[in-house]
Image (cartoon, grey):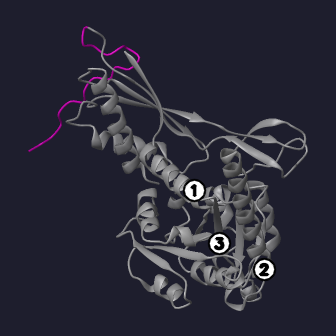
Amino acid sequence: MHEMGITQGILAASFDAARDAGAERICEIRISVGDLTEVQDFALQFAFEALTPGTMAEGATLEVTHIPATSRCNDCELTYEHDRFQMLCPKCSGFNVTPITGRELRIDSIETPDSDGSCPESAAKDAPPDEKEE
Amino acid sequence: MEIDLSKPILDLNERLAAENRAELDRRGVFVVDMMASPGAGKTSTILATIAALRDRYRIAVIEGDIASKVDAEKVKAHGIPAVQINTGGACHLESDMIKRALDALPLDELDLIIVENVGNLVCPTDFYLGENAKVMILSVPEGHDKPLKYPGIFQVSEAVILNKIDTMPVFDFDEGEFTSVVRSLNPTAPIFRIAATKGEGVDAWANWLAARIDALKASIAEKQAGEGS
């Protein structure tokens, strides 16, 4: 959908949070994306790679957690997970259901370098080599 | 060091949407966001809705299009206030555009604002504008398979309008299949069959909308009475 604009939003919020915490660099940004949104992983990663060079998030990783779609049946009170094509209650086939999760688009947290300036191992990804041919 | 943010990615859009909503709640104005493909009959459906409800409610329209004032002029020709938003290429409306449009409307003199989103079955789905309900219109010539191809828009809609039902004999539209797929995507949304330009079926849709408007007004009145006492 609007992965470029969404990624700009993610970066702006992350930069603000990092600066507020006195960090100069970001190692990892963690977000959650619900399975019922129109946001595509590959387009997010592409936008992230295109927008981060030259910023405090250069070389950072974007960790995307997918939130499965769940709904609750108001007739038989079952809470169940479902894909985006089938929301009906699997137990009683009821129509009267309330969506619970699946529409999230959330920035969870960012990881900034440790006191020695290095990224924690889980978040570290070496800055990409400069492959520009000019 | 981990820094917790826990905030919506579309934070700015959602904050502005909440501001729009608060402003509209104060004045008891209901907003419906109408979404559909180009050519599905959004403007015709809006005009038919206005014809059905204008004796009961004071109505205005916000028109979203990439360019031109064609739609706003069509609405104004019926004596209804209309604001045209030209997105200049953007494929959906966002809260800040609605905010500017609201500034141009006499909110104290309105009960209902109908927003006509940009013709698109994908992008408007994830953007909350401060509306009370999103409603999508599919027209018969587009085909019964659209809910399978564009599930998101059918899922965020509180009601689905099937327009141009008078053309059903001409097109190979499998209504049973359409209804069953919409049901599985969105079990609670009613489906209204209409032919907007002929006024057919419009009353059932208009009555649904009227019930929603009345419910909002009642809940706001109750809240205000509670605050006043």
- Do pointers 3 and 2 mark residues of a single chain? yes
Horizontal side of residue A40 vs B173, given as left or right: left
Q: Which mark is residue B210?
A: none
Tag 3–tag 2 contact (CB < 8 Å): no
Quadrant where the N terminus of chain B lies? top left
Give the CA separation, mark 3 to mark 2: 16 Å
Residue B174 in view: no
Q: What's the amino acid at mark 2?
A: Asp
Q: Which mark is residue B26?
A: 1
Q: Which mark is residue B137?
A: 3
Residue A48 in view: yes
Vertically, is B161 above or below B200?
Answer: above
Task: Return the residue found at the far top.
Answer: A116
- Residue A93 on the magenta segment: no
Quadrant where the C terminus of chain B lies? top right
- Residue A127 on the magenta segment: yes
Q: What's the amino acid at mark 3?
A: Ile
Callout 3 secondary element: strand
Q: What's the amino acid at mark 1?
A: Arg
Q: Residues within 10 Å of mark 1 (few under 14, many from 20)?
A: few
Task: Return the residue found at the far left.
Answer: A134
Magenta segment, which residues? A116-134
Q: Chain of mark 1?
A: B
Residue A5 position in % (x across, y down): 37, 50
Q: Residues within 10 Å of mark 3 (few under 14, many from 20)?
A: many
Give the CA separation, mark 1 to mark 3: 29 Å
Tell me which corner region of the image, top left, top right, bottom left or bottom right, holds residue B67: bottom left
Please tell me whether the stretch drawn in magenta is mainly helix, strand or loop: loop
For the point 66% across and 47% down, the residue is B228
